Structure formats: structure tokens, C-alpha cells
Image: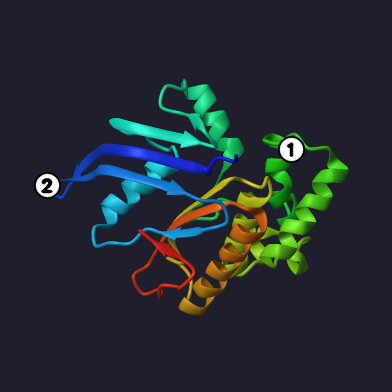
Amino acid sequence: MACDPLVVRNLYAQGSPQSGESEVVRNFSYDFQAGVCYRLTGYHGTEKSLLLQLLGLQTMPDSGEIQVDGIPVNNMNLDDLSDLRNRKFGFLFAAPFLLPAFTVLENVAMPLFKIAQVAAPEAKIITEEIMNLVGVTHVADRSIGELSALEQVQTALARALVHHPRIFIAENLGSKLSLDATERLLGTIRQAARRLGMTAIFTTSPLIAQHPTDVCI
């Protein structure tokens, strides 16, 4: 029986103080299923951010358990944890962090060589598939400086998905995009979650309407 991509039990973590208060994630348990999009909601943005960092293994809890594909991660050393995060996770950050010296296609394909160590012919097929899914095939040969803001985020999204991660993490989606562009981006992520069988976990601006297919936590 296949394991859920991400299972957490009784997570507790306390972040660094901000404005005289400290964000806390307390007794959080959840089974995150493949092919489903999860939107973290709530009033306290700092606590949502801390929970997202915990779920993305970017910080470890003070107590509680995390399993990725059935593998316990709490006692992993830093090297093994980094390797697991690189192989199993895809991240979309507020800034695209694209390499300006490379084309869109080269930026997207890079994880296949650095992480998955895929041969060039196979990498070309996978990269073209993901670029078509995300909608950046038409800008494949352009430099990063020629892209619109949405195309840059789409390219970063394609790069995050190209190695077929089990878990996709994104914080404050659409923070630098229009509402229409953000909805388009979210539609692509939902489609990718279904087609790739991955778990997508994200936060958005409060201005972005909730979608009926998203599970809100």
C-alpha cells in the first residue's frame, strides 16, 4: 500500500520573537495526500510561514514526527535531510532566483542534471513535457531578462516541478503578480498536482479567492 507523501504528527515548534510575540505551531497533525492542493489559511501570517517551513523540512520541529513517503526524517543528519529535500520536494519562492546567463529551457532543466542525474536525451523529453504543462514552451530559448513577471514565475515553477517532486511548497503565491496572473498560476499548480500525483501546499495573499478544489487548513 502506497504511503501518503507527507504525514506529520503532533508538531510543536516555536519561532523567533517578532514584535514582542513569538509564533507557535502547536500539536499539528495531518496526512497530506497525493494529487491534492492544500492551502494554509488563517489570520497569523507568521505562524503560517513557520508551519510551511516545517512541512518543507526547512526547519525542524521542537517535538513531533514527520514522515516523507513513509520515511521518518526527525533523526536524519543534515546531509541526508538535504538530499531528501532536494529529491522529494519542489519549492517556489517569492523571488524566482533564475540564472540570467541561461535560457528558460536551461534554467528549467538544471535540476535534472544536479539532482536527478538524468541523461541528456531523457532530460530533454522531461523538460519539454513540464514546460508544456506550465505554459512556457513559447519562451524556451529566451533569456531571463526578456520575460514578463508572470513568465519568470512560470519558469521558476517549471524548474520546481521538472524532477517530479512528491511535495510542492510555495509561500505567498502571487505576492508580485496581478490577481488574474495569480489565478492562472494556481490553476497550473492544481493541474500539475493531479497529473504528477504530488502534494501541493501553499499560502496566498488574502485577496486570492479560495478555490473549491483546494483543501483549506
Q: Position of residue 153 (x, y in %)?
A: 57, 62
> Quick one: 95 or 9, which is closer to the camera?
9
* Residue 100 badge: none
Return the disc, 1 or 2, that comes first in the chain's sequence: 2
Checking the image for residue 113, the label placed there is 1
Residue 140 percent coordinates (x, y): 76, 61
Q: Quadrant of the C terminus?
A: bottom left
Q: Secondary structure at mark 1?
A: helix
Q: Amino acid at mark 1?
A: Phe
The numbered disc on residue 20 is: 2
Give the percent coordinates (x, y) of residue 113: 74, 37
Q: Is residue 25 above or below residue 175?
A: above
Within 10 Å of disc 1 (Cα), the crowding (few <14, some 14-19, many 20+) is: few
The single residue placed furthest to the left in the displayed view is 20
Seen at 50% across and 28% down, the residue is: 81
Foreground of the two, 199 or 127? 199
Secondary structure under tag 2 reads loop
Colour setting: rainbow
Q: Amino acid at mark 2?
A: Gly
Where is residue 53 drawn, in percent x and y? 39, 43
The image quadrant of residue 11 is: top left
Residue 9 vertical position relative to residue 193 in the rendered view, above or below: above
Separation (CA) of disc 1 from disc 2:
45 Å
> Image quadrant of residue 138?
bottom right
For the N terminus, which image quadrant?
A: top right
